[in-house]
Image: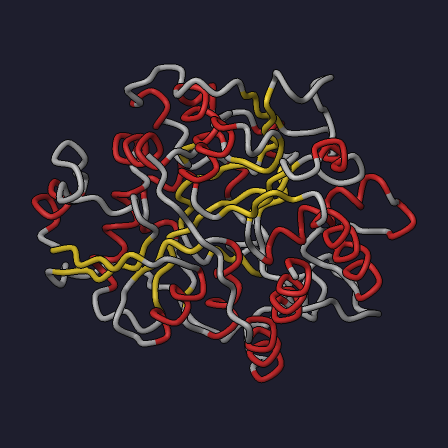
Amino acid sequence: MRLTRTLRAAACAGAALLLAAACDSSGSTSATGLNPPDLKAPTKLGKAEGQVNLVAWAGYVEDGSNDPKVNWVGDFEKQTGCQVHSKVAASSDEMVKLMKTGEYDAVSASGDASLRLIASGDAAPVNTDLVPNYRDVFSGLKNGAWNSVGKKMYGIPHGRGANLLMYNTQKVRPAPTSWSAVFDQASAYKGHVTAYDSPIYIADAALYLKATRPELKIKDPYALDQKQFDAAVALLKRQNADIGEYWGDYLKEVSAFKSGDSVVGTSWQVIANLADSEGAKVKALVPKEGSTGWSDTWMVSSKAKHPNCAYKWLDWIVSPKVNAEVAEYFGEAPANSKACAQTKDRNFCTVYHAADENYWKRIAFWNTPIEQCLDGRTDVKCVPYAKWVQAWTEIKG
């Protein structure tokens, strides 16, 4: 079961990325203008060091201590001799801070953290040839804007999920097909609209404006110049009058839909499944404008003290059987194309659209906004994430 994931972004995220890009010109330049330090991936692996220190989201590194039936760490330790020490992080901000200490070998970073780690030099490029199971990772997860720079991979994809529009089928009629249900038409459900509690939610508004206000010329919801950003913020401030609750805990959202306190808003597939199983009359979909979403990546620290064990972990966690176990426990689509044959629920990958690349082409995966516009524009500066954090506080009042 997917555990709560909060996205308290670092207030200095945008500034840190800008500084890293400006101060190091030795790295390869990407389409975004980001120049990470010129770090080298290993060409071969050595002897396992006997342990590996990981930073991860809750539910990604399970050793049986939370549930005796959920344990993919034990066999890894037996087969590799690498003892796993893990630290659960509650936010991407915490992940970035922990990785900067140099005490951890690898991290399961979301897109709003990965560019920070790359730009600062805290994450090293990954030699995918040393991760045999990488060859079976879905193509749509390789060389993404959130996990690579200059066609150089900085990690191994773990899984992916979409931020869906969920609604009460008895109270929201006709069935919505657009995000307008929570934006321009939200007043129809005043006090019963819910939204994800995070600055990254500004991208959801930008994605909607990309489709409904073409004059803004939004290409990438994570690359907003000041005019585009102001339009997204204005939309969210108007929406705020209709919001009943901003959520960050999936159990609270399930409860709100069951009670009727919430009837329409942003959700995840795992939440929709759970709410439905508990009697809530709900459906969830990707609206016609598309959706935002997440794709987590296992990244190796540039200061890793146990790099060989770290690489063994990367290959293990994306192996078919283990990747299937994690996906079902956590509630997301697996990264390995062979994992679907290993899930206990034979319909799991269908429900989560694991192999439907056309589905994922409609998803704008979380990324970290920086001043160098991620859409490739060079004639204007984009609003960095530090400003997104400030704006989110203003939006919520």
The vertical placement of 142 against 12, above or below, is above
Q: Which of 130 and 86 is in front in this view?
A: 86
Which image quadrant is residue 34 in? Answer: bottom right
Tell me the residue at 88%/45% (across/down).
214
Q: Colour mode?
A: secondary structure
Placement of 269 over or under 183, stated as above or below: above
Give the quadrant of the N terminus: top left
Q: Name which residue lies at 51% across and 41% down.
A: 141
Say left or right for 189 vs 267.
Answer: right
List x then y, in percent, for residue 298.
37, 53
339 in relation to 131, above or below: above
Place of residue 166 in the rendered image (x, y in percent of width and height, measured from the top left): 58, 29
Tally of numbered discs: 0
Which residue occupies 56% across, 48% down? Answer: 246
Residue 3, by quadrant, is top left
- Residue 145 lies, in percent from the top left, at 59, 53
